[in-house]
Image: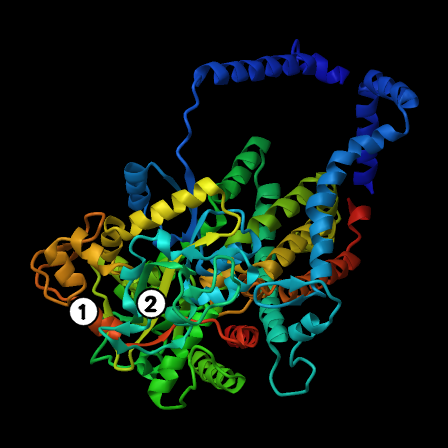
Amino acid sequence: MTQRLDAATQVGASNANKGVSSGARKRRTSWTPAWVPYAQAAPLALVFFLFFVLPLVATFVVSFWNYTEYSIEPAFVLSNYQDVFYGCFSGSSGLCTTFATYLSTLKFVAIVWAVTLFIGFTVAYFLAFHIRTLPMQIALFMVCTIPFWTSNVIRMISWIPLLGRNGLVNETLASIGLVDAPIEWLLYSDFAVALALVHLYTLFMVVPIFNSMMRIDRALIEAAYDAGASGWQTLTNVIIPLVKPGILIGSIFVVTIVTGDYLTIGIMGGQQIASVGKTIQTQINFLQFPIAAANAIVLLAVVLLTIWGMLRLVDIRKEL
Amino acid sequence: MTILKETRGGITRRSILKASAALAGAGVVTKVTGFPAIAQEPVTLRYLSTAVNQSPAIAAKAGEDLGIKIEYIAVTTDDVAKRVITQPNSFDLVDTEYFALPKLLPSGNIMGLDASKITLSDKIASVIRNGTVNGKKVGLDGTAPTEVLYLPDEEATEFAGEETGFLTLIPTTYNADTLGIRPDLIDGEVSSWASLLDPKFKGKAATLNIPSIGIMDAAMAIEARGDMTYGDKGNMTREEIDKTIAVLIEAKRNGQFRAFWTDFNESVNLMASGEVVIQSMWSPAVTAVRTQGIECKYQPLKEGYRAWASGFGLPVAIGEREKDAAYEFINWFLSGWAGAHLAKQGYYTAVLETTKEAMEPYEWAYWFEGKAAEKDIMSPDGKLLEKAGATRDGGSYDERMGAVACWNAVMDENIYMIRKWNEFIAA
């Protein structure tokens, strides 16, 4: 509560400082024609329309088309969706390809989400509460972003010489006598995929959580301390509830990226692990655009549902 | 806006606009005065193919000899076909595999090449023209080039089925593929495709994640193991696809495969790092592993080879000037130098006679006649490939191409096959 009041007074203060300029703005809006704001929003709206809405609509439409090996033909058929869910509802033993693929993706989402949340929260907590000065906080925050100066493919591939059968890790373990034969599951395995995904996407957790933590009024923590709360109680009763929006935003990033990822799963899984993206890629490579479009629409629906579900947990607008 | 003006000092939007207009004006002026007499620029051919086929040296030499600028567009095998169908205006010359033709031709985007404009068209290797090596028929399972080589006319969308004056693709490179192995990491002999699925190599085998080729390698292995025989490995029935995929899934669940690859370079890395000791491989990949000083053998197998062939095609939308240049380039390509350049990487070439002329006799003897190398064999970029005394895996051209069992293919049941392949990947 204090925090919000505080924020309100701050806004008030800054408005007062800018009294002159905001007065000028108010006067101007009065003689600005009503269409001007629309015109101002138009460029972005146009970009969105051309590069987001239109392709999406096209994808949706094409998902109902027919195709041969060298052409796609306008039609309205549901066969592409039937193909996507081929064997899923036949009651046969074993999962159909699509469900198996989504289950495998879901597994990675769960693992990566949990690990990035833990690491991301810890790093953000350290930055926000243990580093005292702002310049140092900024400096260390920059350090976190350094890996992002290279492409994520390179960051991913750099794991391969480390984890391989004759890689650094195995050689080290062998030389200190911990293992006799090289450990096989380090590379081209679920482990490798999860490791690379965590490595790639932890920062997406750190940034929003750190941002939320920086907004916490330090007086609240002092109050909790004065009221006799232990460190753990402060964490669970004060800090975690207040950084919920940050956690949620970070989670949305991580969950959506991992759901759609196929490059990491492909490279680190030795292409042995299925992902929806890879399925779509294979279909596109063989010019089966309509079924690829149907797959993309299903993927989109899954991602949107996930985000919708997550947004139900925390009301971001209210918390921000 | 007012704030902006204040903070930016004297620079206003208007002054920036003025300055940039002046700059642009200056640009126009210099352009006009800078190049007064515009001679006809050298024609540029946008050359679409996989990265493996694109040698910078060939582009440089073509520029030197013909004054034609070759602009490479490098994409993956599947993307070449995709691009031909979806973006037929984005290239002037395509180097694609014959097996893609049953998809490409009906799209109407590929134009027949007039054999009378190709000087050496009747010298093209017989294995491509009529599926024979030294008069002996080779295996024609799959999409054999001879079946898709001829067109009734320039703009046909169906194959002729007999020899005509119009060709779909002029061969650039072709070869017979087999399994690559690391002899230093394998005990005993490998002599059959069945080894790909042999539990002895559990966790150390790899195959391609390119469904149309991967399934044929699997079929070679399954047939070699004696599990089943195929009517046509390059054109399976649904039951055959089902059974093949079932075997693959079982092998995958048993941990047979270390990884799958789609890109040529991935196969090189898998082999060079020792992650994999036996895998489906392409000849230049074996060469690439060897140039790193790592032992790698392109193992001849008793069931024979899976062959492929790639060739030049022209897009229907090609301009007149580009078309002439493309014919000129193709004729140059067949005339020797380019062939020799590619042959030194282990490919076979369209016109063997001119390739032979352009190679040193000891190189020809090593690459095509299966003889022991008299001198060290160098790659085109000057790296040592083989020490003197070595012989080529699989022997001579006649032995290798003569032992072809099947060709890369697109099946009639391709759509079904891809669905099943995805099932295999997801299993």
Q: Earlier in the sequence, mark 2 or mark 1?
A: 2
Label 2 vs label 1, nearer the camera: 2
- Front in this rendered view, residue B217 or B425: B217
State whether residue B133 is above or below residue B5.
Answer: below
Amino acid type, residue under disc 1 in the picture: Ser
State whether residue B236 is above or below residue A64.
Answer: below
Q: Are marks 2 and 1 on the same chain?
A: yes
- Where residue B197 sits: x, y (%)? 36, 81
Quick check: B19 left or right of A305?
left
Q: Which residue is mark 2?
A: B129
- Asked which secondary structure carries label 2, the reply is helix
Real-space CA distance between mark 2 and mark 1, rounded to the nearest whole angstrom: 20 Å
Q: Chain of mark 2?
A: B
Query: For the point 20% across and 58% down, which residue is it?
Result: B353
Q: For residue B12, which quarter of the picture?
A: top right
Query: For the point 55% across and 59% down, which residue is it?
Result: B108
- Where residue A224 sits: x, y (%)? 73, 47
Q: For residue B402, which quarter of the picture?
A: bottom left
Q: For residue B107, which quarter of the picture?
A: bottom right
Q: Is residue A186 visible?
A: yes
Amino acid type, residue under disc 2 in the picture: Arg
- Where residue B421 sits: x, y (%)? 51, 74
